[in-house]
């Protein structure tokens, strides 16, 4: 009975547009998410609070959805120095990330309502990752 209820609830939530199933395509979120793995994007997750640093979010490019990690919040200054994330000039602890020592992104201040996101697997070439703002 319990499994049937969960299945029914999941189907209803998907039908109402509250959740979107996505399939992970690519290696930018390794080791957290693997290529071919399925995940559910909850469209109601931020109705009551904004995204927080460390959250995994689903970003739409217009033709696909990408899973990324929130690394910067509106109004913050974000940079990557020798692969280390720095927020407002201070190093940020990211136990889930695979840092890439060659990455350097100059400091930039995020505008109101703008979040910075990045994949966990920063060992891939910088051209395969984007610091989306």
Image (cartoon, grey):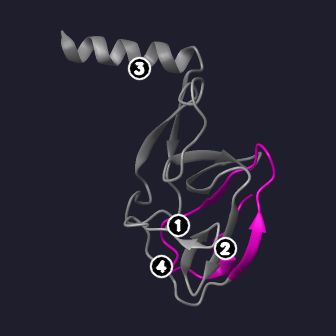
Q: Give the mark, 3 or 4, whose residue is nearer the N terminus.
A: 3
Q: Residue at x 53, y 57 (%)?
A: 25
Q: Nearer the viewer, mark 2 or mark 3?
A: 2
Q: Residue at coordinates 53% horizontally, 52% vertically from top-left?
A: 53
Q: Residue 15, percent across and down?
A: 55, 16
86 in the magenta segment: no
Relative to 42, does residue 5 appear above or below in the rendering? Answer: above
Residue range corresponding to the magenta coloring: 105-133
Q: Residues within 10 Å of mark 4 (few under 14, many from 20)?
A: some
Earlier residue among tags 4 and 2: 2
- The dot on residue 36 is none
Between the residue at mark 4 and the residue at mark 1, the CA separation in whole angstroms equals 12 Å
C-alpha span from label 4 to label 2: 13 Å
The reply to whether residue 69 is in sight is yes
Q: Nearer the viewer, mark 3 or mark 4?
A: 4
Q: Tell me the element at label 4.
A: loop
Q: Secondary structure at mark 2?
A: strand
SS label for mark 3? helix
Question: On the image, numbered disc 4 is attached to which residue?
Answer: 99
Pointers 1 and 3 in contact (C-beta within 8 Å): no
Q: Residue furthest right?
A: 111
Per the image, the residue denoted by label 1 is: 28
Residue 84, image x, y percentages: 53, 79
Please tell me the numbered disc located at residue 10. Answer: 3
**Mark 4 or 2, closer to the camera:** 2
The quadrant where residue 85 appears: bottom right
**Mark 1 and mark 3: span between their CA atoms?**
27 Å
Dot 1 or dot 3, earlier in sequence: 3
Label 2 sits on residue: 79
Identify which residue is drawn at 68% across, 48% down.
Answer: 64
């Amino acid at each position: 009975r319990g499994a049937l209820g969960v299945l029914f609830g999941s189907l209803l939530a998907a039908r109402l547009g509250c959740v979107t199933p996505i399939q992970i395509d690519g290696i930018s979120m390794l080791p957290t998410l693997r290529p071919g793995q399925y995940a559910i994007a909850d469209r109601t997750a931020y109705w009551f609070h904004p995204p927080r640093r460390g959250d995994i979010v689903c970003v739409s490019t217009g033709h696909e959805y990408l899973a990324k990690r929130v690394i910067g919040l509106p109004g913050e200054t974000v940079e990557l120095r020798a692969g280390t994330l720095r927020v407002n000039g201070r190093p940020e602890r990211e136990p889930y990330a695979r840092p890439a020592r060659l990455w350097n992104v100059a400091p930039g201040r995020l505008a109101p309502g703008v979040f910075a996101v990045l994949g966990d697997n920063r060992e891939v070439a910088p051209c395969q990752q984007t610091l989306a703002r």
